Amino acid sequence: MPKSSSFTHSFFSRNRELVFSLAGGLFLLAGYLLERADLFGWAVALYLLSFAVGGYFKAKEGLTDLVKDRSLNVEVLMIVAAAGAASIGYWSEGAILIFIFSLAGAMETYTLEKSERDLSNLIRMAPEKASLLLPDGETKVVNVESLEVGNRILVRPGERIPADGTVITGESTTDEAAITGESMPVDKKSGSSVYNGTINGTGSLTVKVTKRNADSLFQKMIALVRQAKTDRPPSQQLIEKIEGPYVITVLLTVAVMLTIPVLVFGFPFEETFYRAMVLLVVASPCAVVASVMPALLSAISTGARNGILIKGGVYLEQLAKTGVIAFDKTGTLTEGSPAVTGFQALPGNDEEAVLAAAAAIERQSDHPLAHAIAAYAGERSRNLPAVETIEDVPGYGVRAVIAGETWHIGRSGFAGDTQAWEPVRNVTGKWAEEGNTLVYAAKNGEPAGFFALKDQIRPAASAALNTLADAGIETVMITGDREATARKIAKEAGVSRYVAECLPEEKVREVERLRKDYGAVVMVGDGVNDAPALAKADTGIAMGSGTGVAIDTAHIVLMNSELEKIELSLELSRRLNRIVKQNLIFSVAVIAVLITANFAQSLTLPLGVIGHEGSTILVILNGLRLLRVKQRKGGPAEPGTRERLKEAEVS
């Protein structure tokens, strides 16, 4: 098939409603020209074609609801109004009514499809095959559904990454625009996370699978899109609830207008019928019905393009009412993985030798603290010694033998006698007060050195919290960590207050207390222990790097775990509510004015059609403005710009 034919076919299949609407408009224009040329018979034929083609989709929708659900809607009202206009000789006005109504419907359909397109295209992008690395070093092509956690896969240059995982070997860049909205390639090396559906750059990567295909971020995005499509916010539910009774009321009013004035007061039937048809047109709630969903879907689409997945309109509407945002600490305000913040070798010990021993021992452990020490020490020591034996002592540390010497790494009492560490207690005490965890190393029972480790604040956390404070929103950190650590992290991040040593059920109770004090509560978290609080909050927001339980429980997901996107979510919610309110006031006011003008007999059918359908198009265009909302640029928070920290009692 030629490229031009293929493009035409593709465009038609994607925009059939718009094509039919425009075709109806062309028939309308041709009919009008023939009518001006006194070829009225031909003009009527073209007007009928305009009715049939332009109104096809809306008539089908209205009749389907009438037959299948036995419900009346605005589509039925428009069909009756257009037919009524034609029956009294107003062919062009009826055709104009159908054309503008169908055009407004095509715009609404476009908005719906636009809201899905950014993420629904991912379904076609989903990799189906993966190169599984076998124990003998060979590769085997398998279906992505068969991949299990722990499998190792090979990703060649230019391929789509078939699973969520962690890079083991290799360096490359990946295009994550479809997943996270990041426009620039992202560097990947050993230890970096990669996502299903993203595109590998010019280097080969060996990746360890961390999530099954069904649990991958990619598949969860698709599920969220499907969920958002079917959800309706309270305002739209109310409109849909009253639409049927309203249409019945209008039809009954028209029936009364057609009978009482003629039979009781002797009004001319033709004039009475004309006024009834005008009422049928102007009283239709088309603009009211279109006041919410185009705006909502535009906001959902904008969120998706910026890495914010919103599970439904009810949550986006609710978000604007937020008075306080509660944050989990680990993995939310912090990176979720510890890093070495300090190291000191004791007198009489060679610093590089201690670091080399620590790196050699700790790289054989799966403990997060061990990973951090191995990475830190490995970068600072050139030659790592061979570990002869190693024994993990749960709850205390690890014991190993290197070159006949016994090393202990772990708690102070495990790594030598506690009293032996007294000479450095001023340093270790200071580091502990700053929120660090201390890990001690001893050789042959004698203190050799110690490490300070701490979970690091996310780079953008302070700036994001600063922005929320400027918007008048209180921020609270709820964590299971001990008091000293919580105090230090709260001060660094700049939250209004903190609550430490919270179990999962205590986080739920804290959310309830915050609701009493501030009203609507947002909870932001990433872990399994955050799930109950995420569910209890008015709006739960999960980090995209978090657990599947947190993502499933939350109402909104920050795909790239960017805290600054919370402010954009709030802005979308505020603008959505503002635009919906504008649309409803405007559309109801237009209907009231047009109905009043009709009863005053100062409104013609053409003006009624233009006023009514014009207002419908205007509210849709107003809603489409949400497609252009952008993240406001903000720099990092300056130290001391906000002195809002209030130490709260630990619950």
Image (cartoon, grey):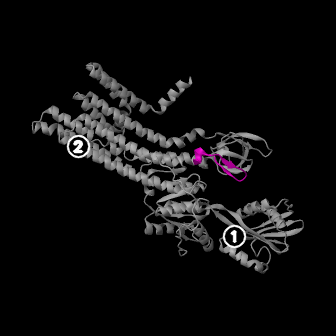
Reply yes or no: does residue 190 show up in magenta. Answer: yes
Please give the name of the residue rendered at 76% of the width and 80% of the height, measured from the top-left corner: 422
| Residue drawn where x is 50% and y is 57% of the image | 567
Q: Is residue 277 left or right of residue 398?
A: left
Query: Which of the numbered marks, if any, corresponds to residue 595?
Result: 2
Q: Amino acid at mark 1?
A: Thr
User: Height in image: 444 above or below 469?
Assistant: below
Q: Residue 273: where, in percent of width, then height? A: 19, 34
Residue 74 image-quadrant placement: top left
Residue farthest to the right, as pictured: 404
Q: Secondary structure at mark 1?
A: strand
Residue 531 is at least partly visible in this image = no
Q: How many marks?
A: 2
Work out whether 447 lies above or below 115.
below
Horizontal side of residue 338 vs 502, given as left or right? right
x 37%, y 46%: residue: 291
Residue 191 visible in rendering: yes
* Distance between the alpha carbons at the discs numbered 2 and 1: 73 Å
| Residue pointed to by mark 1 | 437
Quadrant showing the N terminus: top right
Q: On the rendered structure, is 286 left or right of 433? A: left
Amino acid residing under circle 2 = Ile
Query: Which residue is at the front of the view, 487 or 380?
Result: 380
Instruction: Please provide the residue range marked out in magenta.
Output: 176-195
Identify the mark at residue 50; answer none if there is no mark: none
Q: Is residue 507 left or right of residue 86?
A: right
Instruction: Classify residue 651 by image quadrant.
Output: bottom right
Residue 586, position in %: x, y? 32, 47
Q: Is residue 500 located in the magenta-colored stretch of the structure?
A: no
Number of other residues with Cα within 10 Å of mark 1, as a class: few under 14, some 14 to 19, many 20 or more = many
Give the secondary structure at mark 2.
Answer: helix
